[in-house]
Image (spheres, helix red, strand yellow):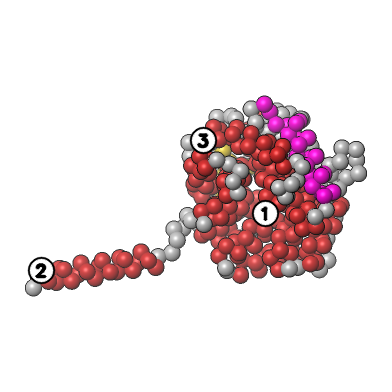
Amino acid sequence: MTRLLTFALAVVLSVTFSAAQTTSPAPPTSPLNIARILAARYPESPIMSYIPAVAWSSSLRLAQLTGEEKWKDKPRRDIAAFLSGGKPAIAAPYALTSLAGHFAFVDLAAADGNKEAAAFARKAADFILDDAADGTVKFRRNWTDDMFMSSTLLSRVTRDTQDERYSRALGQLLTTYAEKLQRQDGIFMHAIEGPHAWGRGNGFALLGLAEALTHLPQAWPDRPRVLAIYRKHVNALVPLQSDDGAWRQVVDEPTSYRELTVTAMTTAAMARGLRLGWLDPSVRPVVDRGWAAVAARVNPDGTVRDVCSGTGAQATREYYMTRPVVNGPDDRGGAMALLAAIEIAELTR
């Protein structure tokens, strides 16, 4: 009798455990669960800027990946304030960091068929096109930041309008910036006046290249050169990854702290390169370690750790090494971590 009861209990426990295994949710650190946490919180300040736009765009992608329409609500609501005129979409003082925010308008147009959002984005792209002799864009600062700000908007508008004015200007900007700022070893300096390998500055360069390669056609004349710049940059960043998977505030300085935004941006750009076939599969462990480092810096309430504060271009290495660190709620860190989560989820689907 005792033997029979023991057997019965073992069967019940086995069935219960099996049921728990089949019905338990995804691990809390899964890319989609972390994306949900971050999309629910960011942006906290829905201003016209690239930072909210990264969160808006990533939230729209989260809705598409999960089939959960609620993730479109915040981007729709925040962007509607600009479309209605309640907030100015293009306003002085003009800056690429602000105007780049229109790239999320393109993504909203794709998600909802919102023609008004698409028209706003094209107006912003026209506004930054330059008639200067070098054929790039207005409001540039000649920092690697410009590579991301220009590419996010101009690549999407080119794709949707087939107007090559935008892709010509973008190709000129990306290739001339690489000539000036990419070192022989493949790493980018932040600027001529800031000749140091700032982490987020390298993230801006790599993601800017990836955005152009994503949205512009195979026949884009500058594609071979931009792809070569991207691959050279990836090859340079791989050996600089720290033992926990993160990249550093100054990527080639071993004593520099391990920073979230460069890690998220680099992980996202490499994950996309793997998914779209630009990189060899041997890079996958690097991407997985990068994602582990991002996930470790996102708290259950959506606050983040190890985020470099806003940074300009300065001459000394000490300036970049000693930038204040944000630990807590942060729109920039949250948006970039959200982007990385989406790219990893796409890669692992």
Residue 120 x, y percent position in the rendering: 82, 61
Q: Residue at x 71, y 29 (%)?
A: 195
Using the rendered view, name the quadrant where residue 106 is placed: bottom right
| Residue stretch rendered in magenta on the structure | 164-184
**Viewer-side residue, 51 vs 144:** 144
Q: Is residue 235 visible?
A: yes
Q: Amino acid at mark 3?
A: Ser
How crowded pointer 1 is (Cα within 10 Å; few <14, some 14-19, many 20+) is rated as many
| 3D distance between C-alphas at marks 1 and 3 | 25 Å
Residue 255 x, y percent position in the rendering: 55, 30
Residue at the top extreme, as displayed: 184
Mark 2 element type: helix
Mark 3–mark 2 CB contact (< 8 Å): no
Mark 1–mark 3 CB contact (< 8 Å): no
How crowded pointer 3 is (Cα within 10 Å; few <14, some 14-19, many 20+) is rated as some
Q: Earlier in the sequence, mark 1 or mark 2?
A: 2
Residue 344 x, y percent position in the rendering: 54, 52
Using the rendered view, name the quadrant where residue 346 is placed: bottom right
Q: Is residue 177 magenta?
A: yes
Residue at the left extreme, as displayed: 1
Q: Report the disc number at residue 54.
A: 1
Q: Amino acid at mark 2?
A: Arg
**Viewer-side residue, 105 vs 284:** 284
Mark 1 element type: helix
Q: Does 33 appear above or below 23?
A: above
Q: Residue at x 72, y 42 (%)?
A: 223
Q: Residue at x 51, y 59 (%)?
A: 33
| 3D distance between C-alphas at marks 3 and 2 | 55 Å
Q: Which residue is mark 2?
A: 3
Q: Which residue is mark 3?
A: 242
Q: Residue at x 9, y 70 (%)?
A: 2
